[in-house]
Image (tube, helix red, strand yellow):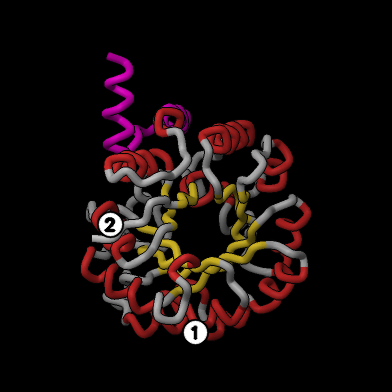
Amino acid sequence: MSLPSKVKIVEVSPRDGLQNEKEFIATPVKIELIDRLSQAGFPNIEAVSFVSPKWVPQMADGAEVMAGIQRRPGTIYSALTPNLRGFEGALAAGIDEVVIFGAASEAFSQKNINCSIAESITRFEPVAQAAKAAGLRLRGSISCALGCPYQGETPIASVVDVARRMLALGCDEIDVADTIGVGTALRVGQVMRAVTEIVDPARISGHFHDTYGQSLANILAAMEAGISIFHSSVGGLGGCPYAKGATGNVATEDVLYMLRGLDIDTGIDLDAVVDTGQWISGHIGHKSSSRAGNALAARKAA
């Protein structure tokens, strides 16, 4: 079994983790969350999104959040930017990387944005061109890459097709995302190996939700397929508003604990992440869903 010696973790809790919280989270709390994550050593933090506040009210304060954080040299701060207006907001806020997204499921694309996959990717062309012209990193996220709440299993050919389109847009990194958490290790290996035939594995990341408790196994399978970038969310925060029953992202603490056990370097302070997971969970009023985080916090408190 060949595993990487180093893994890059993209921490998504400030954006993907918090966006579905019903109660508005105060801007200073969001700023402190990002600052804590920066200090813990994350190389990439998905900080905010510049989408219509009508659609995602939780993310309405993106500009204020970015203005308030203490930037750590070497950390990439990313924002979700679905259109040119969002891109302009991200550019003004000093974002390092813009993120565009498209589903690998035709049914998901039609139901959520009323257009085909091909049309959805075409809509991002002006954003991609603007990002490149501004010298920013561009990341493309492929949602429903392992399954869809409407059509079931996603054909591998569809994932490869979207990856090819995102590559053509100039994406520096491409996320293969299991939005509803239905993936299994065998399927993850198959999908990742297919995508790495057209995209350099060093530019592919895995984004797994833990709906069926398979995320850690899926990360291991993805590493065996040559992937060394993964997304996670402190405390397991987040879900998908469009996918019924979809639970949070895989918890960062669980991923770090597993990687430490495999002697894989991340450059991230696990203790600081555990503290942050407990802190933010307390702020939003529900217990952290990280098993490793809760166990380590309990051990520390004993």
Residue 115 at what x, y percent from top left? 52, 82
Tag 1 residue: 116
Could you tell me if the residues under marks 1 and 2 are in contact, i.e. CB atoms within 8 Å? Answer: no
Q: Which mark is residue 67?
A: none
Instruction: Please state, as top left, top right, bottom left or bottom right, where the C terminus lies in the image.
Output: top left
Q: Is residue 245 visible?
A: no
Residue 27, above or below 74 = above
Residue 19 at what x, y percent from top left? 51, 49
- Residue at 71% x, 67% y is 131
**Amino acid, disc 1:** Ser
For the stretch drawn in magenta, the main secondary structure is: helix
> Quadrant of the rendered structure where residue 33 is?
top right
What stretch of residues is rendered in magenta? 275-302
Residue 259 at what x, y percent from top left? 33, 45
- Residue at 29% x, 63% y is 224
Q: CA distance from mark 1 to mark 2?
A: 32 Å
Q: Is residue 152 left or right of residue 100?
A: left
Tag 2 residue: 220
Kind of element beneath mark 2? helix
Kind of element beneath mark 1? loop
Residue 119, above or below 3 = below
- Residue at 55% x, 51% y is 46
